[in-house]
Image (spheres, rainbow, N blue to C red):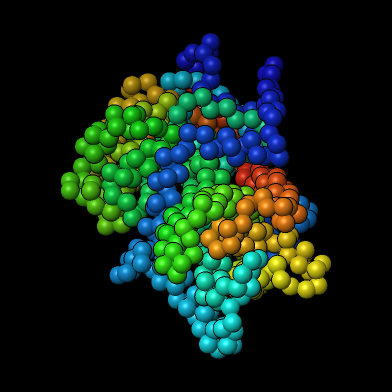
Amino acid sequence: MEMVKIEKKKFDLFGLGQIIGEHKGKLRQIRMLSVNELKKKYKGAALGPLWALIKPTFTLFILWFAFEIGLRRNGGVHFINAKYPQFVFMLTGYVPWFYISECIVGGSRSIRNNKQFVTKLSFPVSNIMTFTSLSGLYIHFLLCVIMYIVLVCLGYGPSWYNLQFFYYCAMMYLFFLVLSWATAPLSAFSKDFENLINSVITGLFWLSGIFWNTYDIRPVWLQRLMYFNPINYFVNGYRKCFLTDTFIFDANYTTETIVFFAELVLMTFVGAHTYKKFRKILPDVL
Amino acid sequence: MLSMEKEPIIEFVDVKKEYFLYKNEKARFKAIFTKNKGVKKHPALKGVSFKIYPGESVGIIGKNGAGKSTILKMITGVSFPNSGQIIVRGKVAALLELTAGFSLDMTGIENIYLKGYLLGLNDDQIKEIEQDIIDFADLGEYIDQPVRTYSSGMKMRLGFAININIKPDILVVDEALSVGDADFQQKCRNKINDVIAAGVTVLFVSHSKKAIEETCTRAIFLKDGKVKVDGTVEEAFAEYDKKK
């Protein structure tokens, strides 16, 4: 009678192997789809891609107005080694935050938004998260260039430490990508999960050090607790490269770095595992 | 059967598939944490086995809900079984969802590349067939316009042109396929017949005995998620008509 072949169990670390396999030789496809994602987002509007700049600029202005004029906190913010004007401090925090928030929200919606790839084509679904977050990265680069010009004009930099940007940016991309490996399939499966993420995002904004210094708060245990929020690692990291000229692996911040990497590794496995678990049922539930 | 010595190009071994039926969104949210305990299931395939050999033309018949689309979705790699094994050896061109994967904001040419990548081709392979696709779709100047400006018929034509030109090993055709006006419809039929004559393996889904007899030498009759008859077109339809 028939011999039923049993599929060889390939080495697949919590599903990580599957995701890496799905990306092999797909570079062009991912690049094309990431550009397409941008086109989709800004098509039809007269100002088109300018909206990518208008939205964060406007929000930043409002925040600055509320804090500097409204609350009269015009003394600036002390951060690591010096006092910085409120505007400069917020600018360096808000630019990475804008990417992070787009990535968390957009990442969690990505599979549902690209339903047709899941239900109608044989498509490596994990690529959806990659090209979605990549399209956000283009906007982020643009904002960073503008931010850098403003900072240099105001007398901050240039400095060799500015190059650390590439480390923080890469880590930020990676972290929120692996996060979306978990959130995107869950949101695709249940709309309630997507709403949950949308509700959490505002809280995350106020809880992270976008316009206040997380290194300054008391008591000390609360300050340490802040290390567990990866958003702080990036927001403060950007300030370390553009404002304070602090080395990434500066001895004062070893604990924070270790906590971040532990979270990154953990999130990678949680994300890959969740993705693997949901991959095969996604076409049925979408 | 044509060539029993050869490896089957499509092989289903005791394939089972169940769909979970969630009562509402709340049940679905709960299922994330409870591993689908107590959720009602609908069995779509109850152990389907068959082999299709290279060069065969097989008709698939059955009423709505018999499991035809589920099987096709598995062959095209969209859906996955709960248990059992599916082996597909070769490139599949499915004339089912012709416009799936199109980006409305890209031009026709760009979409040829995008769709080509999605179907697993590389730049060189796409370049090779690009002109054939453009000629077949026959969209004139529109090929350089964004696909959102196309009529639905034009989108279908481009979709068909791409799918049929990728040099598939397996062609999946749904008879209900409608591609624009009568002229183009005829052009598509001719093209499908050319590809079939060239020796590609064909899966043909239809309710019409005449259409299946024209192209197929074998038919599989599905009933309630099982293979009821796997034999000649005559045998399959005898059983199919009996139940009407």
Q: Residue furthest top?
A: B5
Which residue is at 59% across, 82% downward? A75
Count every numbered label the image shows and give the total.
Answer: 0
> Which residue is at 56% across, 67% downward?
A93
On screen, residue B38 versus residue A52, left or right, reads right
* Quarter assignment of residue A211: bottom right
Q: Position of residue B87 (x, y in %)?
A: 57, 27
User: Is residue B109 visible to us here?
Assistant: yes
- Looking at this view, is A199 or A92 the one in front? A92
Nearest the eye: B31 or A13: A13
Q: Quadrant of residue A74?
A: bottom right
In the rendered view, tell whether residue B229 sits above or below residue B82.
Answer: above
Residue B227's place in the image compared with B6, above or below, is below
Q: Picture coordinates of residue A217 (x, y %)?
A: 74, 73
Residue positioned 67% across, 39% down in the render:
A15
Identify which residue is drawn at 54% across, 76% down.
A85
Residue B180 visible at all: no
x and y percent of residue B16 in the render?
A: 66, 37
Percent across and percent down for residue A48 are: 34, 66
In the picture, measured across the screen, residue B93 lies left or right of residue A88, that is left
Q: Using the image as rendered, state which of residue A238 and residue B171 is in the foreground.
A: A238
